[in-house]
């Protein structure tokens, strides 16, 4: 996206329209793969309802695996809630193995963190190596 167009909500608007179009076309299981090096994209994906359900490290580096079922109502995660620094993939795997799903990206004083909680709107854990 052009630098002058950033911070205007255009990407998030496009994501919302994409979800609506998917629903109209009968697609309900939505997925995304997002790099931790792209926090604005990760934040937008989480904001529209996708959840971190896995992490994957391959030749392209680490990535978050996101999922939602667009038919399910937006469910606020239940406690316990844990916050994991965006680059700590072992801690992400540990949270996922506890049955948690990442639902928000927070900007803290020391680092960005993915906030995890329990949610009924998630796929089977897929925290792959």
Image (cartoon, rainbow, N blue to C red):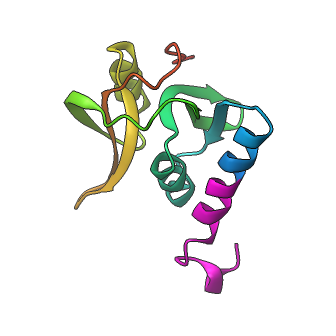
Q: Residue furthest bottom?
A: 4
Nearest to the observer: residue 105 or residue 12? 12
Quadrant housing the C terminus: top right
- Residue 35 location (% of width, % of height): 59, 45
Name the residue: 52% across, 60% down: 40
Q: Is residue 43 above or below residue 116?
A: below
User: Picture coordinates of residue 118 (x, y %)?
Assistant: 31, 24
Residue with the most extreme right position:
25
**Direction from residue 89 to residue 16 in the image, left or right:** right
Magenta stretch: includes residue 117: no
Q: Residue at x 30, y 33 (%)?
A: 77
Residue in view at x 23 percent, y 33 percent: 82
The residue closer to the viewer here, 85 or 99, is 99
In this rendering, would 36 be left or right of 94?
Answer: right
Q: Quadrant of the N terminus?
A: bottom right
x, y percent for residue 15: 64, 55
Q: Say left or right for 97 vs 81.
A: right
User: Residue at image x 41%, y 21%?
Assistant: 93
Q: Which residues are magenta?
A: 1-17
Q: Position of residue 66 (x, y in %)?
A: 56, 34
Is most of the magenta stretch helix, strand or loop?
Answer: helix
Q: Is residue 108 above or below residue 89?
A: below
Identity of the residue furthest to the left in this view: 80
């Amino acid at each position: 996206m052009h630098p002058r167009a950033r911070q205007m909500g255009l990407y998030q608007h496009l994501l919302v329209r994409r979800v609506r179009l998917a629903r109209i076309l009968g697609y309900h299981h939505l997925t995304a793969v997002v790099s931790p090096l792209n926090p604005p994209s990760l934040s937008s994906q989480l904001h529209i309802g996708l959840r971190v359900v896995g992490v994957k490290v391959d030749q392209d580096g680490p990535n978050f695996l996101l999922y939602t079922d667009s038919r399910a109502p937006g469910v606020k995660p239940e406690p316990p809630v844990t916050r994991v620094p965006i680059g700590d993939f072992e801690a992400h795997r540990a949270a996922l193995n506890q049955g948690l799903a990442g639902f928000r990206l927070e900007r803290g004083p020391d680092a960005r963190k993915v906030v995890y909680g329990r949610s009924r709107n998630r796929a089977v854990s897929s925290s792959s190596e």
